[in-house]
Amino acid sequence: HAERHVHTMACRGRSAGGTEERSGQGDRGRARPGHPERVHDGSVVEPPRNSLADDAVYALTRAARVLERALPGISMADFRMLSAMSDGVGRASHLATLLTLGKPAVSATVDSLVRRGLIARTPREDDRRAFDLALTADGERIRRDAHDALAAVVVDIAAHTPDATATLSALAVFGEGVKARGAERRAAYDAAARAAEDGTP
């Protein structure tokens, strides 16, 4: 995964949450980051920014660029696709759901990987209009090389933080959060699609 939170330890000493007391709100008044709120006169005030979240966004966007440059001749989209297929996902529709991509984006990436000989596409026996997708030997080699290159970069970045092990652990926990959020969003999307098919609000 490209999402990497490398500033967790470095930011330990900073004030978390950006929750400052709002005047006139008494003991109730701690602003929630990112949520404008009305005060007693009806005016809207913007809450303080969450400095830790700002630092995390900056770290993640920089890390994404560093990781993309470390890939050996493929894009991050290619790597995500190859990794999903290495885990046994072999249908374009399933890849679209897992990677939260539109079908046109999946089709374009699949076509590119097929042309480069990194995946094979074969018609299904039970439905000749559908295809099974599988990594080729070259595709698995490229995926493994890419994974090793990314892991080396992550370990190197973590080594530049006060506690490398804690940073790597925080990244792993962050990854679980990304996975859980994706599953939640997919479930909501599926529920909305079923409701639309049933004609229910």
Image (spheres, grey):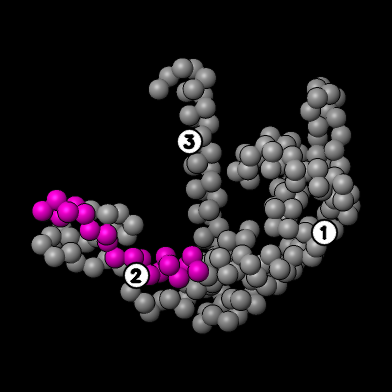
> Residue at left 69%, top 43%?
105
Q: Is residue 55 above or below residue 142?
A: below
Q: Nearer the viewer, residue 117 or 136?
A: 117
Instruction: From the top left corner, tell me how far across and down residue 137 is, in percent.
Output: 89, 52
User: Is disc 1 placed on a helix, strand or loop?
Assistant: helix
**Type of the residue with mark 3:** Ala
Q: Residue furthest front?
A: 43
Disc number placed over residue 188 in the picture, else none: 3
Side (left or right) of 140 relative to 5: right
**Type of the residue with mark 1:** Ile
Q: Is residue 102 above or below residue 158?
A: above
Which residues are the magenta region?
A: 38-58
**Type of the residue with mark 2:** Ala
Task: Determine contact: label 3, label 1, CB under 8 Å.
Answer: no
The mark that comes first in sequence, 2 or 1, is 2
Cα–Cα span, label 3 and label 1: 34 Å
**Quadrant location of the C terminus in the rendered image:** top left
Q: Nearer the viewer, residue 154 or 46?
A: 46
Instruction: From the top left corner, tell me how far across and down residue 53 is, in percent.
Output: 42, 65
Q: Is residue 41 magenta?
A: yes
Side (left or right) of 79 relative to 21: right
> Residue at left 43%, top 67%?
54
Residue for badge 1: 142
Cα–Cα span, label 2 and label 1: 41 Å
Cα–Cα span, label 3 and label 2: 30 Å
> Residue at left 61%, top 76%?
157
Instruction: From the top left corner, tell me how far across and down residue 185 is, in percent.
Output: 50, 41
User: Is disc 3 placed on a helix, strand or loop?
Assistant: helix
Disc number placed over residue 16 in the picture, else none: 2
> Residue at left 52%, top 60%?
173
